[in-house]
Amino acid sequence: MTVAQALMWAKRELIASNKTLRVGLESEILLAHVMGVTRQWLHTWGEKQVEEDQFKDFQELISKRISHIPIAYLIQSASFYSRDFYVDSSVLIPRPESELLIDNLDFYIREYNVARVAEIGVGSGVLSITLALKYPHLQIVATDISKDALEVASVNLERFSTIDSDLKKRISLRHTSLLDGIKEEFDLLISNPPYIARGEELDLDVLSEPHIALFGGEVGDEILSEIIALSAEREIKILACEMGCDQRQSMQKKLEHFSYKPEFYRDYARLDRGFVACYVANP
């Protein structure tokens, strides 16, 4: 079977499954992954033969995709800030919207001389690693309640650590809930916590992701509220979190109650997506 024939077969299978998929793109991504080539190579060499074992692997991936396993898990890779991070089913798949959290921190990191950062819920490590690569002076403590997630973050820490970046010395991964047992002081706390209400209807692909990283409680903002209270208790100067698009009002109320002055930002769909807040108590 040629490359072109394998892609045609996959497109037919995906279309027949009645899933709303980018059938051409996803077929190419999965076949390129199996063959160890680029999508551009597939376009150029459509008449090349796909080896029998490669086609069997391709068939298996297409079957898994039809059963709602996200493509990032199938190829164990997700792009974030133009870097390819390792991911598996134990971590949330990084979204482009989360890059905005990094972008909105630039002013605060420079203006407030931020040097010590904590991240709650490190997951795959994309936020901490991206921040550390962008700002070489930062020291970061990143926590997660999931040991499996910390293993994924460790893989990415190893992948992006170089002699120049020295990430393994500047990012410390800790297995704990929130900041339990962590005594260090911090200038900035960041988090992309679970913020979806339990029982909310979600796409089946999203439901393949770890529920511990998705659902924030009955209302959805319970963990966010804990993080705000904890940040205020420790008098952390800057708090930056992603949130649900319908949570701006509740977050503003909670932040102001704990003496934080928030600036909210929107995502690419112009929906409220997060905030950066300054601690203003005892100025």
Image (tube, rainbow, N blue to C red):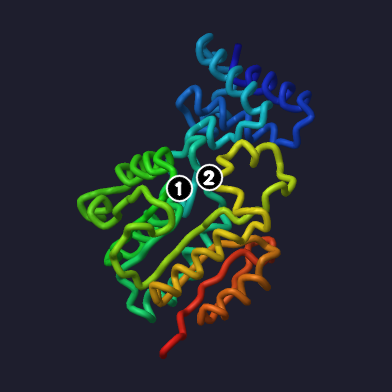
Out of 177 and 277, give the one closest to the viewer: 177
Out of 251 and 116, give the one closest to the viewer: 251
31, above or below 235, in the image: above
278, above or below 62, in the image: below
Question: Residue sitting at 46 percent across and 85 percent down?
Answer: 280
Question: Residue sitting at 25 percent across and 50 percent down?
Answer: 168
| Residue with the most extreme left position | 163
CB atoms at circles 1 and 2 under 8 Å apart?
yes
Q: Position of residue 92 (x, y in %)?
A: 53, 45
For the N terminus, give its image quadrant: top right
25, above or below 242, in the image: above
Residue at which label 1 appears: 123
Query: Mark 2, residues whose alpha carbon is within 10 Å: few (<14), some, or many (≥20)?
Result: many
For the C terminus, give its image quadrant: bottom left
| Residue with the most extreme bottom position | 283
Q: How far apart, in angstroms, are the residues tagged by discs 1 and 2?
A: 7 Å
Amino acid marked by disc 2: Leu
Residue at which label 2 appears: 92
Amino acid marked by disc 1: Gly
Q: Position of residue 277 (x, y in %)?
A: 50, 76
Q: Quadrant of residue 262?
A: bottom right
Residue 110 appears left or right of 121: left
Residue 50 appears left or right of 8: left
Question: Residue sitting at 62 percent across and 24 percent down?
Answer: 64
Q: How many callouts does the rendering have?
A: 2
188, above or below 175, in the image: below
**Pointer 1 or 2: first along the chain:** 2
